[in-house]
Image (spheres, rainbow, N blue to C red):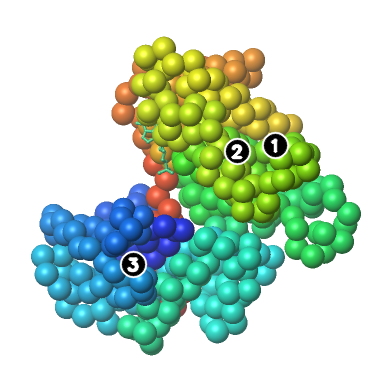
Amino acid sequence: MKILVLNAGSSSQKSCLYEIQPHTDLSTPLEPLWEASIDWTVSDEYGLLKVFANGQKRKIDLPLDNKRDGILIMLETITHGHTKVLSSLDDIDIIGHRIVHGGRSYSRSCIITPEVEQTIKDLIPLAPNHHPAHLEGIKAIALTLPQTPQVAVFDTAFHSSIPPKAKIYPLPYQWYERGIQRYGFHGISHGYVSQRAAQILGKPMEDLKIISCHLGNGSSVTAIKNGHSIDTSMGFTPLEGLMMGTRCGSIDPAILLHLMDEYGYDYGQLNQLLNKESGLLGVSQISADVRSIISAIANGNHQAQLALDIFTHRVTSVIGSMIPGLGGLDVLIFTAGIGENSPLIREQVCSQFSFLNLKLDREKNQGKCLDRNIANPDSSVAIITIKTQEDWAIALQTLPFCPKES
Ligand code: AMP
C-alpha cells in the first residue's frame, strides 16, 4: 500500500511517500520511499524544490506565481529522473493531508468530500496562512489523481477532548457561541509523541499522566490524561501560550489596547509585532533560533541570556500550571527542534521540578537520547525525548481509509 503525505505550511510544502506492506510493523516509523520539500521563501524570483529518493538528491527551481504547478512538478519527481520510485502516480493508493484547523466540525480524520473541502475554505479566516496552501494541495491531487481518495488529518482534532472549563475564554458567552474558543495546535505531534512515549515505557497510554512539550519555532505544551488532551497552551490561534521564535505567546491583552490608543497601532502593525518581531527574536535582538542565542550567550551577550531565561521560565510555568489538572505527572516529553536538540533547555526546565522528585540523568541528556527515557532510574517522572514524526503520524491516520485496508 502506498500512502502519499502532503504537509503544507505557510511558506513551505513537505511531502513523503510511504510503502506499507500487510505485515509491516507500524510501531516504529518507516523511512519514506521518497521525500520532497518546497521552500517558497528562498528568493523573490523562485521557490526551491528539494527531493530525496533512491539515495539521490535533486534540486529544482520553481516558479512562484503558481504554487499548484509547483506541487505538480514535485509529484513528477516520483515517476521521473533519479528519484523515480513509482512507474505511475496511479500506484498511490491514498493521500493524507495535514490540515491545520478543523474548527469545531472535525474531531477526527476523514475522507475529503466536497463538504469537507468547503469547511476548509470556510475556516480560512482562522488559518489564513495555511488553509489556502492546503486547498492548493488538494486541488493539485484532484487534477492528477481524480479517483484516489484524499484524507484530511486535522492538527486541532487531538484537542477536541479539552473540557469546557479549559477551552472557553472568560469573555461574554456569545463569543464562544460564535466560535471563539481554545482550539489548540500541534495536535498531530502531541498525539504521536504521547503514544510513542507510552510504547517506549511499555505502559498503556490510558494509565499515564503526560505533559508533552513541542518546542520548535512554534511551541506548545499539552496535558494528556487517559490518552486524551485535557489542556493545551495554544488557543484560538497558534499565537497564545509559550514564547516562540518570533511569536510573543501570552501577553496582557491590554498591551494591545495601549499600543492602539497611545501609539496608533493598526491591525497590520500589531500582527507584524506579535507574530514576526517578538519572542526569542524580539527579546534577544539577535535571532529566533536557539542555536544562535546559545552561541551569543557563550560570547557574553546578556540580551540573549534574557531571551533564553524568559523562554525556559514560560515553559516551566505552563508545565507547572497543568500538573494539578492531571492530578500528578508520570511522563514529561520533549519534542520538535528545540525539545529534541537542546540538552541545555531540557536541563533548565527539568531542574525546576526537582520538588516532584523529577530527576534528569545528565549523561543520558547529553548523549544520543532520541526516543529514550533520559530520567534517572529513581526519578518519579519519566523524561522522554521523542523525535516528532508528523508525516508518519499522518500516514498512520490515513491508513484506515485506504480502500485496500477495508
Ligand atoms: P522546528 O520548528 O521543530 O523545526 O524547530 C526549529 C528550531 O529548533 C530552530 O529554530 C532552533 O531554535 C531549534 N533547534 C534546532 N536544532 C537545534 C540545536 N541543535 N540546539 C538547539 N536548538 C535547536
Quarter residue 210 falls in: top right
Q: Position of residue 178 (x, y in %)?
A: 79, 65
**Up-down relation of residue 406 to residue 28 (above or below):** below
In the image, what residue type sits under mark 3? Answer: Leu
Q: Nearer the viewer, mark 1 or mark 3?
A: 3
Read off the residue under disc 3. 64
**Up-down relation of residue 71 to residue 334 (above or below):** below
Quarter residue 261 falls in: top right
Q: Residue at x 58, y 74 (%)?
A: 121
In the image, what residue type sits under mark 2? Answer: Cys
Read off the residue under disc 2. 248
In the image, what residue type sits under mark 1? Answer: Ile
Decide which of tag 3 and tag 2 comes sooner along the chain.
3
Q: Position of residue 138 (x, y in %)?
A: 44, 75
Q: From where the camera sits, is residue 274 visible?
A: yes
Quarter of the picture for ligand 1?
A: top left
Label 1, label 2: how many angstroms apart (C-alpha)? 7 Å
- Which numbered tag is attached to residue 251? 1
- The quadrant of the image that shows the N terminus is bottom left
Q: From where the camera sits, is residue 405 visible?
A: no
